[in-house]
Image (cartoon, rainbow, N blue to C red):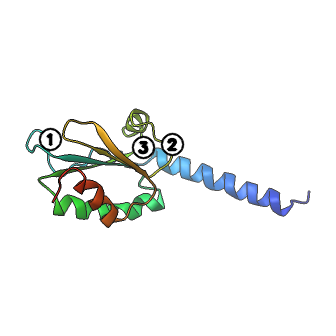
Amino acid sequence: MKVSSKQAIVIVLLTFSILIISCNKSSKPNSGKEAAKPEEVAFKVTFIELGSVWCIPCQQMQPVMKSIREKYETQVNVVFYDVWTEAGAPYGQKYGIEVIPTQVFLDVNGKEYFRHVGFFPEEDVVAVLKMKGIK
């Protein structure tokens, strides 16, 4: 049986998808990592990253989140939910995400005031934080 190039591509993509799904099921939940506990600090903003440890743009967001966490540790609560895990999936549903990574910004009252989809450079994140008085 001769396989066309289109069929070969479909087979490769299906194999890759199955591999990703099977690897994901064995991954450990990586949700809820926070700079500090909310009851200890009254944060002005909560910066939520909804993504996956397997997603390349999500991985590129990790240094941005770390930097924001370090620079604004008493003002901004930085949270990451891996929505491809059992523990993180409910947060993907809660925030109605369709694409990862998605960044959601909540004000001091927990109300969403900004949302972005895809990689979000640090300087752009800082501009969003400044909207709520972060210095």
Q: In the rendered image, which quarter is residue 60 located in? A: bottom left
Q: Amino acid at mark 3?
A: Val
Query: Can the viewer see residue 3?
Result: yes
The residue carrying pointer 1 sits among few (fewer than 14), some (14 to 19) or many (20 or more) residues within 10 Å by Cα, namely few
Q: Amino acid at mark 1?
A: Pro
The residue carrying pointer 2 sits among few (fewer than 14), some (14 to 19) or many (20 or more) residues within 10 Å by Cα, namely few
47, 34: nearer the viewer:
47
Q: Which residue appears at 42% of the width and 42% of the height?
A: 85
Q: Which mark is residue 98?
A: 2
Looking at the image, is mark 3 or mark 2 nearer the viewer?
2
Question: Where does residue 100 sit, x and y in percent of width and height?
Answer: 47, 50
Q: Secondary structure at mark 2?
A: loop
Q: Secondary structure at mark 3?
A: loop
Question: Where does residue 92 sit, x and y in percent of width and height?
Answer: 42, 39
Judge from the rendering whether residue 9 lies leftward or rightward of residue 36; answer left or right. Answer: right
Q: Which mark is residue 83?
A: 3
Q: Which mark is residue 38?
A: 1
